[in-house]
Amino acid sequence: MFEAAPPATDTELDQTFAEEREHAYRGITAQEVASAILEGIRADNEQIIIGQAQNLYSASLQNPTAIFKQLNE
């Protein structure tokens, strides 16, 4: 079983969310996400953590309560 954790991805859904919050960052492309997932599967990596999601993942291992709070503010 594989698990993929992409960062913000430039999709129609993300564009709407970013516009509502007046954010300029649109994330990486869906093609980049798909390529990273396929590469992870080929390498038999069960956890595929992509791009900036790696930072969040690492921080959540160190202080999950703080990260949860930050994400839900």
Image (cartoon, helix red, strand yellow):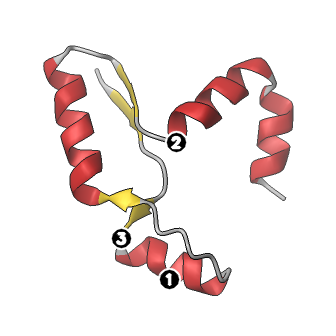
Residue 46 location, quadrant = top left
Quarter occupied by the N terminus: top left
Which type of secondary structure does the marked residue at label 3 adopt? loop
Most distant residue in the left direction: 42
Q: Amino acid at mark 2?
A: Gln
Picture coordinates of residue 41 (x, y %)? Answer: 19, 24
Which circle, 2 or 1, is nearer the viewer?
2
Quarter occupied by the C terminus: bottom right
Which type of secondary structure does the marked residue at label 1 adopt? helix
**Pointer 2 or 3: first along the chain:** 3
Task: Determine the residue positioned at 45% across, 61% down.
Answer: 27
Q: Is residue 68 above or below residue 12?
A: above
Q: Amino acid at mark 1?
A: Thr
Task: Determine the residue positioned at 63% across, 24% down.
Answer: 58
The numbered mark at residue 16 is 1
- Measure how far apart labels 2 and 3 are at the Cα level: 16 Å
- Identify residue for label 2: 52
Q: Amino acid at mark 3?
A: Thr
Residue 9 location, quadrant = bottom left
Task: Determine the residue positioned at 44% across, 40% down.
Answer: 51
**Pointer 2 or 1: first along the chain:** 1
Which type of secondary structure does the marked residue at label 2 adopt? loop
Picture coordinates of residue 26 (x, y %)? Answer: 47, 69
Picture coordinates of residue 55 (x, y %)? Answer: 60, 33
Task: Tell whether label 3 touches label 2 (CB within 8 Å).
Answer: no
- Identify residue for label 3: 11
Left or right: residue 15 compared with residue 17: left
